[in-house]
Amino acid sequence: MGHTRRVTSIIEQDQQVIAEISNDFPHTAVVYQVYPRSFADSNGDGVGDLPGITSRVPYLRSLGVNAVWLSPFYPSALADGGYDVDDHRDVDPRLGTLQDFDAMLAALHAAGIKVIVDIVPNHTSNRHPWFVQALAAGPGSPERDRYLFRDGRGVRGEEPPNDWESIFGGSAWAPTGDGQWYFHCFAAEQPDLNWENEEVREDFRRTLRFWADRGVDGFRIDVAHGLRKDMSEPYPPWGEIADIMRPDGSHPLWDRDHVHEIYADWRRIFKSYDPPRFAVAEAIVHPTRRARYASADSLGQAFNFAMQDADWRPEDYRQVINDGLADMINNRSTTSWLLGCHDTPRVASRYGLPLDDGRTAQQVARDWLLTDGTTPRLDWTLGARRARAAIMILLALPGSTYIYQGDELGLHEVADLSQEALEDPVAGRSSSEKGRDGCRVPLPWTQQEPSYGFGPGGAHLPQPDWFSGYAVSVQDADPDSTLNLYRQALALRSQLLAGDGLNWVESELSVLHFARPGGVRCITNFGTEPVALPAGEVLLSSAPIDHGRLPADSTVWMRVS
Ligand code: NOJ
C-alpha cells in the first residue's frame, strides 16, 4: 500500500474537553452566509432584499442549515458592499424596512433557523450623522473625538500625518480641508471610530441590544481585531508595520490585547438574554492569537481562515485541522471552519487552477482574476469536484461550519466581469486586485431570464450565461447535484457527526482519513489514482465509488465493518 505513517491522535482527555465545549448550539451549527444584496430580489430593482430572503426560507430549510448570517443590510451608499454603515439600527430602504426584518426573522425562526447579524464596529460610513457632525464641528471638538482625526504635516497641514496605508490601497488618511485628516483602514468612505471614546462604546451597546431585543440570536463582528488602536506619536513608519500579523499584540493598529475588554463588556450584554446571544469574530490575526477571540470571555468563536487559505493538499488540510483542534482543546472553544465568504474567490475556482509552488491557491486565483479568468486555464470540472470533496471534510469535523451562499450550487467565480460592472472599492484603488465582485454576483434560482430567478428585474452585477446550468431548479431535479450533496451531507451530519473529537487513521500520504467517535469515517483521496476503501457501508460520497475504490479528488463518509 506504499508509504504509510501515523499522524497525531487526539487523546481521550482532550476528546472529553471537546465534547463538553462543543455541545451547545453555536459550536456545532452549520451557518449559511447570506449576502443580502445578491441573494433574492423581491421587487425587481436588481438588488436583493429582506422580503426576498423571506421568500427563500423554504430553500434554506430544505438545505438543512441551522442558522443564517446576514452580511450588512443597513442603510449604506455601498462604498464597500454595505460595510459602510450609515445607521446600524435600521434597514436600507432598498432592502426593506424594520417590519420586513421582523417578518424575515419570524419566518426563519419558524423554520428552526437562527439569525446572526453583522456588526461593523471599526468604522461608520462617511454619511453617518456622527461623521457629518464631526466634519462640521472642526478640530478639537467632541464630535471629532468619536473618530480618529489628526493634524496634517506641513505648514498648513497639507500632508497626511504619516505614511500609513489603507487595506484597500493608497493612503489611510483623507483630508478634511481644515488642516486635519481622518484615518480610514478601509475605504475613505469608512472613517474609523475612536474606541477610547465612551460615546462610541455606549452606542454599540445600544446597537447590540437593539437587535437582540428584536430576537436576533447572534452577531458576526467585523474587523474584530481592529478596535483598540495606538495612534500616539511618534508613528512608526509604514515599512515597519505593513505586516499585520504579530504574535505578541504589539502592532499599533491590529490585535491589541485591550480589544478583549470590549468583548468582555459585550459578553455581559449577551448573557443578559435568555438564551444568551452568541458571537463570532472576524479576526485576521496571527494563528497563535485567534483563540483569544474564540474564548468564552471574549466573543466565543472566531473564523478559522486557515482553511480558506489552504491549498488542495493533504498536508495542508492535516495541519489546519490539527491546529484548529489544538486551539479548541487549549482554549475550551471550537473552531469555525469555512471554505469561502464574500471576500474571497470561490472555492470551486481556487481548486481548479494549477497549484503553483511559492503562491497559495488564494494568490493564484487573485492573479487569475486580473487576467479576467483567462490565464492560467481553469479546470472547471476538477475545481468543482474538489470543492465537493472539501465541504465533506469540513462538515465531518467537530466545530461549526460556515457556508457561503452559492457554494452549495458549486458556483465558480465570475472572473470576466467588465471593469465598468465592478462595484468593489478594491478594484478602483489597487492595480494588483480585481476585487471581490466575482463571488457576489446574484444567485441563479431558475433558468429564466431576466435574472435567472433572482428577481423580476435584472441583477446589480451581470450574471454569466453559464449560471443557467447551475440554477437551483436544475440542481433540485438532479440527485447527484452539488446542491443535493450538501442537503444529504447536512442531514447526515446532524444525525451522525455532531459534537466530539476525532482520531486520525493511518493512511497513505495522499489520503486524509479520520474517525469520529460515533463510528463514522471521513476519507479523502487527494492523489491522482483511485484508492481501495476499507470494507464497510458507504454513507455518502462526493463522487461515485468504483468497485470499492475512492476516485481521485473525492471524499467518502462510511462505517467500517
Ligand atoms: C471585512 C468584511 O468581510 C469586508 O467585506 C469589508 O470590506 C471589511 N471587513 C471592512 O468592513
Image (cartoon, rainbow, N blue to C red):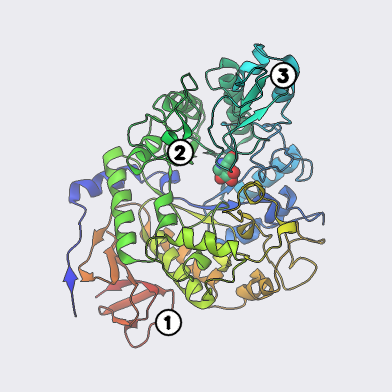
Observer able to see residue 116: no
Which quarter of the figure has residue 210? top right
Residue 136 or 479: which is nearer the viewer?
Answer: 136
Question: With respect to residue 379, does 218 lie above or below?
Answer: above
Observer able to see residue 365: yes
Q: Which residue is mark 2?
A: 242
Upstream in the sequence, badge 1 or badge 2? 2
Q: Quadrant of ligand 1?
A: top right
Q: Amino acid at mark 1?
A: Pro
Which residue is at 71% across, 56% downward? 55
Q: Mark 1 packing: few (<14 Cα in 10 Å), some, or many (20+)? A: some
Eye-nearest disc, 1 or 3: 3
Where is residue 17 drawn, in percent x and y?
26, 43
Q: Amino acid at mark 2?
A: Ala
Q: Dot 3 lies on which element?
A: loop
Where is residue 15 drawn, in percent x and y?
24, 49
Residue 377 or 379: which is nearer the viewer?
Answer: 377
Q: Which residue is mark 3?
A: 178
Q: Which residue is mark 1?
A: 544
Where is residue 380 drawn, in percent x and y?
54, 75
Q: Amino acid at mark 3?
A: Asp
User: Between marks 1 and 2, how big is the CA–CA gap?
Assistant: 47 Å
Where is residue 395 drawn, in percent x and y?
42, 60
Residue 34 or 171: which is nearer the viewer?
Answer: 171
Asked if the beta carbon under badge 1 is closer than 8 A to the nearest atom of ligand 1, the reply is: no
User: Between marks 1 and 3, how big is the CA–CA gap?
Assistant: 67 Å
Q: How many marks?
A: 3
- 223 relative to 106 in the view: left or right: left
Upstream in the sequence, badge 2 or badge 3? 3
- Locate the N terminus and report the quarter of the image it occupies: bottom left
Which residue is at 38% across, 63% downward? 393
